[in-house]
Amino acid sequence: MAELQIKDLAVSIEGKPILNGVNLVIPQGEVHAIMGPNGTGKSTLAYTLMGHPSYTVTGGEAFYKGINLFDLTPAERSHLGIFLAFQYPVSIPGVTVANFLRTAVNAKRKAENPEDKGIPIPEFRKVLKEKMEMLKMESSFAGRYLNDGFSGGEKKRTEVLQMAMLKPEIAILDETDSGLDIDALRIVSEGVNLLRGKDLGVMVITHYQRLLNYIKPDVVHVMMSGRIVESGGPDLALHLEEHGYEWVREKYENGVASL
């Protein structure tokens, strides 16, 4: 099984340090939750791994399949098998969900085989219909413009549909629960759980235990001051929900947190 390996990662934005030596391993087949207070670098980690140009890597490495991600463009990272579900997905008026997904699928196929002519339209429609039925999405959804006028729940379900179509091996979910009511959260989580398996590693970034009630993590990590300072099993998230982060902060400041 391949694994995403992050070692001593340091990142800054406009000269301001945000990540200060992140060490993390996400294997295929496991779900790892990243928790922590606002401003600790959780989303910075996600965007850096996918190659957002606003984030400058000042130290460390991130490898997948033996390849340094920072030597690749965002598209190449995606073709390698890494996927990012955005906290705030962008609207693209004029581009339907179906056309967007077919273009993305064809780009991935082309990267794997330069001679590939693209997925035949009948085959694409069949696969899209299967995935939308699996995620309990109306067929009319495919004809809507991408995220244009979508509710928060619809945007996040579209992100999960992208995952289903592109079949990544490492998925990074950046605060997928943000802006969702309980019903939308349950539906989106069910979609993620349907895609879980031995071939998919998942990094779930969240502030709250409520998402982890639905997407059960194998490992929970706490990030503070741009570093992973505590790791444990699912019970760690429950403890954070009950006691907050202050106890972790005190351990970290006293030099006894697990680094």
Image (tube, rainbow, N blue to C red):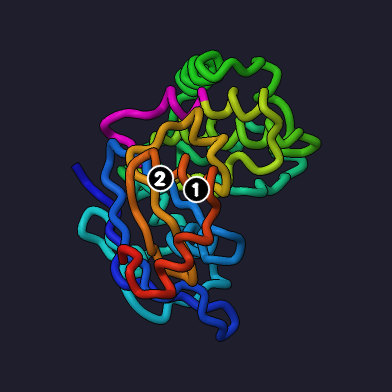
Please state if 95 lies on the left or on the right of 235 as rendered.
Answer: right
Determine the secondary structure under disc 1.
helix
Residue located at (43% from left, 22% from top): 194
21 part of magenta stretch: no
Say which of 137 and 226 sits in front. Answer: 226
Q: How many marks?
A: 2
Please state if 5 lies on the left or on the right of 175 as rendered.
Answer: left
Say whether residue 65 is visible: yes
Q: Quadrant of residue 171?
A: top left
CA separation in Å, label 2 and label 1: 6 Å
Q: Residue 240 — which label?
A: 1
Whole-percent x, y for residue 81 in the image: 35, 46
Determine the secondary structure under disc 2.
helix
Crowding near the residue tagged with mark 1, few <14, some 14–19, many ≥20 C-alpha atoms within 10 Å: some
- The quadrant in which the C terminus is found is bottom left
Q: Identify residue type, mark 1.
A: Leu
What is the span of residues highlighted in magenta in the rendered image?
190-201
Whole-percent x, y for residue 140 in the image: 70, 18
Identify residue for label 2: 236
Whole-percent x, y for residue 143 in the image: 70, 25
Say which of 152 and 74 sits in front. Answer: 152
Q: Are marks 2 and 1 in contact (CB under 8 Å)?
A: yes
